[in-house]
Amino acid sequence: MLPATDAHLSRIVARGDEGMISLNNVGSAGQALHYFSKDNYYTQDQGLEHSEWFGNGAEHLGLSGQIDRAAFFELLEGKVEGQELGKWVRNEETGEKEREHRPGTDMTFSAPKSVSLVAEIQGTRDVREAHEAAVKKALGYIERELAQTRQTEGGKTEAVKTGNLTVAMFRHNTSRELDPQTHTHAVIMNATRREDGQWRSLTNDEIYNAQRVIGAIYTSELADRLQALGYDIRRTDEKGNFEIAGITREQIEHFSQRRAEIEAALKAKGVDIDDASAQQKEDATLKTRARKVDVDHDALIADWKARAKEVGIDFDAIQAKADAQRAQGGVIRDDKLTGRQAMEFAAAHLIEREAVVSKNDLMAAAIEHGAGRVSASEVQRAFDKLERDGDLVKLPDGGYTTKKMLGSEMWALDQVRAQKGQTPRMMEPEAVAARIAQAEGRQGFKYSDGQKDAISKVLTSQDRYVAVQGLAGTGKTTMLKSLRELAQEQGYTVRGMAPTGAASKVLARETGIATDTVSMFQIKERQLQKDIEFAKQYAPDFVRKAEVWIVDESSFLSQRQKAQLDHMAEKAGAKVVYLGDTLQLQGVEAGKPFELAQKDGIETAYMTEINRQKTPDLKQAVDVITGRDGLQPGQRLTQVALANNARAFAFMDKTGMVREVKGDSGQLIGAVVDDILKLGKAERERTIVITAYNEDRRAINAGVREGLKAQGELSRSEDTREILVSKGWTRAMQKEAQYYQAGDVVRFGRDYQQIAAKKGEYMRVAAVDAPAGTVVLKKEDGTTIAWQPKKHNKIEVTTAIPASWPRAT
């Protein structure tokens, strides 16, 4: 949970072109006076009160209708039904005890800009009411599912649901820059009532964790209500955000001065708004925030109408179409979903990458996917049913997985146990030790303990599956060369595989092992096993030659891939060596089977003697970070948790390997650029710069390019090309037309004769018909095809980005 301080003012969780939901801690009761200012609230003659109480807590307290100032401030101060909430702390300056109470949380719901234009300029009350109803739908979810307080019984404190909130809702209709902006401040009081009638402070951990779900519920409900009113909507991003059809992006931007200011503030720092971190956006928001001023509301609306006319917004046409469709029962979608279909998408989408996901993420992904096509309530019911039926499985830690994924993991772990002692030893231990000693004498250096352990375990184990946990720089290549030679001497065929094409080429080149990618290996092995089954019809005595399969970089394997390999190996009678490092980045797909297998008892050799660093200081830094420096004499390092990062950094700082740059990130980037430019060309080509942020990467690259131009090493003229960057979509997203946008580029990974697409061919998205599930693709020769993504899965979707390269001089 974020601490209740002004340092943590906002976390944006859902946004359209300018629509968003944000959470702000109310700093103090005194600071809440601005909610009652008269800058831009709806007036009485518009038929809407500017404020309203909401929630079961408010109902219990007899609070309804317009917000009463006295009751509002008492609740913010934690005074409720004779109780004073909060905790008593001692003032460090006066020594006196003081009551400390967090007043509440301001959750602000802002409508998409096009909705604000119709609601505020056209003055369509139904649209404003749709926004308010969507706000209440989201608040109802918070009250029903997330309202909690802490309760201590028997010395154990836990969060318990209360099912009640007291919320003060304030309606606004302008931004600080006096653009039309329909939004509602929902001030959630830090008070909730337990079953025993006692009031306690609200625990808002779950509210913060569920921000994305809350935002999705608001957006989904608003979309449903607008469509019921007859308005067509157009989806604007992958998160289900939308705008009213008939209002263009350019017209929206004309009325989005606030966003333009934030973009400009970020751009001044060299940061693109789409790449900015949450903290950077928050800083830019605060620094550009104007003070609200009192205005003549009628004059403001007249100005808005004039501006809308200037940019060509035809409100009458939009309303006429909406009225006609409303008379027919609202917008009828051809692509409606059921709640179960939305949940099935969410599970497939999320669990492709992570074996265990949270309920919040599942709910948010499903509601966002189905926005405008299925209600959030129906999605909630589908989630509950899938959990009851066992299709979604809740784990002890509160996370969720699918029955299929859980079954795959359990099968793989059972398979490792079942296949212990099921293969013959390739060599006896004494013979392995003798051959290692011979090799050491011949090559003039000794193997590390980890290398000898790995060679011995693989050759002498009778288990079908063996793991080698090897840190980077521990000599895995040398170990594999020796393993290949010894296995081949015993009559085994050694085959290798790695997750990527680049890794498979390196393994083949450095070890002499015939290697494929994991995917290609599986394709070849499936065909080989089919051929052998066919051949045995005519040669029943045929016996396949014994094989050892080396799987490099096994931490990148998904659960699906490892389960398939385990099954294939048993059928082929092969021995499998899973070689990798659990501390490396995991693969894109779901599961951590290499790590799980080690925890569950797969026979494992440990290679932890790192030899890559050459200087004494770097060697000692590695010993510190791995924990080797804390071992007792004769003790071997096996498990490495990397829990000593801070100590290792302090050691490197002490020995002069760390340079601190005073100032902001711009000065740090400048120092990095200067250091690179001081290097000679050959040294520069051997130097890499690693940064955690895309904006820093771009700034450093741009600085170096400009520096090299100034030094005459690059021409000031540039060539402009288009580069394709993968959108990183899951297979579930690739199948859905609604996620494609004009300009996207699709690469086909195999031939599809029915659409005349060849393997490796690129086609650009020309148009999308989401309700029909069709994407129009344009070929290089200008011809187009109507393509249905659901029917073809061997594709990659990229976005085209223009890029410039300076010419070398």
Image (tube, rainbow, N blue to C red):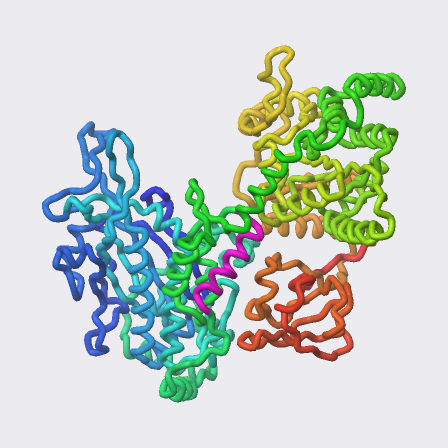
Q: Give the camera-side residue of 636 and 645.
A: 636
Residue 163 placement (x, y as % from top left): 25, 52
Residue reaching furthest to the top? 633
Along the horizontal axis of the image, is 467 left or right of 489?
left
Residue 209 placement (x, y as % from top left): 39, 49
Segment tinted magenta in the rendering: 338-355
Residue 291 placement (x, y as % from top left): 33, 60
- Residue positioned 79% across, 47% down in the render: 516
- Judge whether residue 354 is colored magenta: yes
- Residue positioned 20% across, 46% down in the render: 194
Q: Give the camera-side residue of 687 and 756.
A: 756
Q: Give the camera-side residue of 232 and 269.
A: 232
Can you say which quadrant of the picture contains the C terminus?
bottom right
Image height of 730 relative to 680, above or below: below
Residue 307 placement (x, y as % from top left): 42, 80
- Which SS type dominates the magenta stretch? helix
- Residue positioned 53% across, 54% down in the render: 350
Q: Give the camera-side residue of 314 and 189.
A: 189
